[in-house]
Image (cartoon, rainbow, N blue to C red):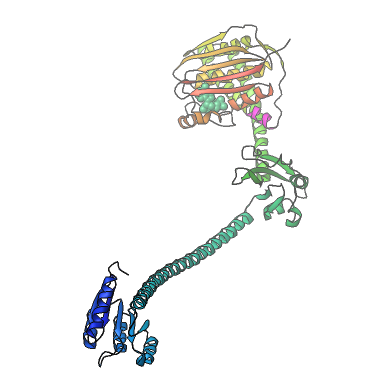
């Protein structure tokens, strides 16, 4: 309801009554319209919307009931109070049935009338407020319903997405199983409690076992079955076991390489591990054949070479001419080179068979170094050889011939890989329980990523392989490392491309 005063239409054919009622009501603060006839009243109702109609029941041919109907048609909330005499009490009751709010008996008590009007207007106010609340509730209801509908839609959508995800997961699980089952390597998966929870067909076939027998086994029981060394513990990412090669006895003996990786859990802990078994029996056989060939071929090459060298020396002594001596020198130098290559091949073959033998004795390091450099000083005139040593008596526990071989190789490399000449410097130092010999050159150097590989069999740096100007087979450092290992020492390199290299050999000191 607005803040404007309530609008009231008063209808009565007795002018004095009409005036009195209007005056009383205006004094109460209402905005009062008056009509003395039925048709005036109908006109006013058509024109205005009234909050309250106060009408005599009997006016003229248009009675109060007609006005009531018209007012309700115009605005169903209009409150109607009818004034009636005793004679028409029955009609007043009928009027109530038709929706009038109240009736007052004429002549009416003014206070009663004021009270009836107040109540009527109050009822109108309440019913309007009720309607507003109902409209608000209806709106809220509609909002809830639409939220409900959109929630329902979202749930349906999420359910469909979930179903799709589950489908995808099942598909990738099927794919994973297919990959694992078709692997040509054996696979066992351990859970966080260290029990086998997955085994692929290759693993079962390799170890002549069945799925049911394998499931639930701990690593110690698996080790009994396969002959492998038991897993240390469940490996974490940092401590994942190094690859291990073992022999599986069984009816069909196999050589197997085991690789263990941890399965990291979300919390960063290890939630189990995956063990892959590679059957390397064929590879081992090929390696064996290769080693056998290497050993036989180098032995076979060495015999004729030895006799060629012997006879060349003999011939040199018999022919005396300077020219012939020069030719023979070349032949001998090439034979020595070939002999070195064959010796290297033989050494590799011995290392592979674990038979590189060394005979240890006290060796004075500066003496060996001087001996090695003396050989090169006569042949390499483009290089300057320097020795830095503050302890002439420094003595190591080593095999003298093998140490000579190692240092010769390092100095020979220093010369070979500094093709523009320059210095080759050998430094001898005492370091706690060890002696250190460092062979330094200022040659082509070695790229960082290749430095750890140059001690491998047949490895040559890319630049060396590409240029082919340096020769060699990539065996020297491999043999050096095997010899130094055998003597309980270490060998390492520091190098920068274009700035040269330093090879450091560390050997145990001789303790008197
Ligand atoms: P080889 O010299 O017969 O190739 P080595 O085993 O003696 O075989 O050396 C392996 C590789 O290491 C060489 O091919 C070369 O690439 C690199 N290398 C060794 N010594 C040096 C050096 N002093 N300077 C630069 N590169 C070197």
Q: Is residue 68 above or below residue 368?
A: below
- Where, by quadrant of the figure, is residue 287 drawn? top right
Q: Is residue 349 magenta?
A: yes
> Is residue 489 toward the left or the right of residue 65 in the image?
right
Q: Is residue 321 visible?
A: no
> Is residue 7 toward the left or the right of residue 512 in the image?
left
Q: Position of residue 392 (x, y in %)?
A: 62, 6
> Is residue 230 toward the left or the right of residue 382 in the image?
right
- Where, by quadrant of the figure, is residue 13 drawn? bottom left
Name which residue lies at 38% across and 70% down: 129
Q: Which residues are magenta?
A: 345-358
Q: Is residue 95 above or below residue 214?
A: below
> Is residue 358 toward the left or the right of residue 325 in the image?
right
Of residues 28 and 367, the one drawn nearer to the viewer in this rendering? 28
Quarter holding the N terminus is: bottom left
Q: Is residue 400 visible?
A: yes
Of residues 178 and 185, the one drawn nearer to the viewer in this rendering? 178
Q: Is residue 257 above or below residue 15?
A: above
Q: Position of residue 364 (x, y in %)?
A: 66, 10
Of residues 280 and 215, the one drawn nearer to the viewer in this rendering? 215
Q: Position of residue 290 (x, y in %)?
A: 64, 38
């Amino acid at each position: 309801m607005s803040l404007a005063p309530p609008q009231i239409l008063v209808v009565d054919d007795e002018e004095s009554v009409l005036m009195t009622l209007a005056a009383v009501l205006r004094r109460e603060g209402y905005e009062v319209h008056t009509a003395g006839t039925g048709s005036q009243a109908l006109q006013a109702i058509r024109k205005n919307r009234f909050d309250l109609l106060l009408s005599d029941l009997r006016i003229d041919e248009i009675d109060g009931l007609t006005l009531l109907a018209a007012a309700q048609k115009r605005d169903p909330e209009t409150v109607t109070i009818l004034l009636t005499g005793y004679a028409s009490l029955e009609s007043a009751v009928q009027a109530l049935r038709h929706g009038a709010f109240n009736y007052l008996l004429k002549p009416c008590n003014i206070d009663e009338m004021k009270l009836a009007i107040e109540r009527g207007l109050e009822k109108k106010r309440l019913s309007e407020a009720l309607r507003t609340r109902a409209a608000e509730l209806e709106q809220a209801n509609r909002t809830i319903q639409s939220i409900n509908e959109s929630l329902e839609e979202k749930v349906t959508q999420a359910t469909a997405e979930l179903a799709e995800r589950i489908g995808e997961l099942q598909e990738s699980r099927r794919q994973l199983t297919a990959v694992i089952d078709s692997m040509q390597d054996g696979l066992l998966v351990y859970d966080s409690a260290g029990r086998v929870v997955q085994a692929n067909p290759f693993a079962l076939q390799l170890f002549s076992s069945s799925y049911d027998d394998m499931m639930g086994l701990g690593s110690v029981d698996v080790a009994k079955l396969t002959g492998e060394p038991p897993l240390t513990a469940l490996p974490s990412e940092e401590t994942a076991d190094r690859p291990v090669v073992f022999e599986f006895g069984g009816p069909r003996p196999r050589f197997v390489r085991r690789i263990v990786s941890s399965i990291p859990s979300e919390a960063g802990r290890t939630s189990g591990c995956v063990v892959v078994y590679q059957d390397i029996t064929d590879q081992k056989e090929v390696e064996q054949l290769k080693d056998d060939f290497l050993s036989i071929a180098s032995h076979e090459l060495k015999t004729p070479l030895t006799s060629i060298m012997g006879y060349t020396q003999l011939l040199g002594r018999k022919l005396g001419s300077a020219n012939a001596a020069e030719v023979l020198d070349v032949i001998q130098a090439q034979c020595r080179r070939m002999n070195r290559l064959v010796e290297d091949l033989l050494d590799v073959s011995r290392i592979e068979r674990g038979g590189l033998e060394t005979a240890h004795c006290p060796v004075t390091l500066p003496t060996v170094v001087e001996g090695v450099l003396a050989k090169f000083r006569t042949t390499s005139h483009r290089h300057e050889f320097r020795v830095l040593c503050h302890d002439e008596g420094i003595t190591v526990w080593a095999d003298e011939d093998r140490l000579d071989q190692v240092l010769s190789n390092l100095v020979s490399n220093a010369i070979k890989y500094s093709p523009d000449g320059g210095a080759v410097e050998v430094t001898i130092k005492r370091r706690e329980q060890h002696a250190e010999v460092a062979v330094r050159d200022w040659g082509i150097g070695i790229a960082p990523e290749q430095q750890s590989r140059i001690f491998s069999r047949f490895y040559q740096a890319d630049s060396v392989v590409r240029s082919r100007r340096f020769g060699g087979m990539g065996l020297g450092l491999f043999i050096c490392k095997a010899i130094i290992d055998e003597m309980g020492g270490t060998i390492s390199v520091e190098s920068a491309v274009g700035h040269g290299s330093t090879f450091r050999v560390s050997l145990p000191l001789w303790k008197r």
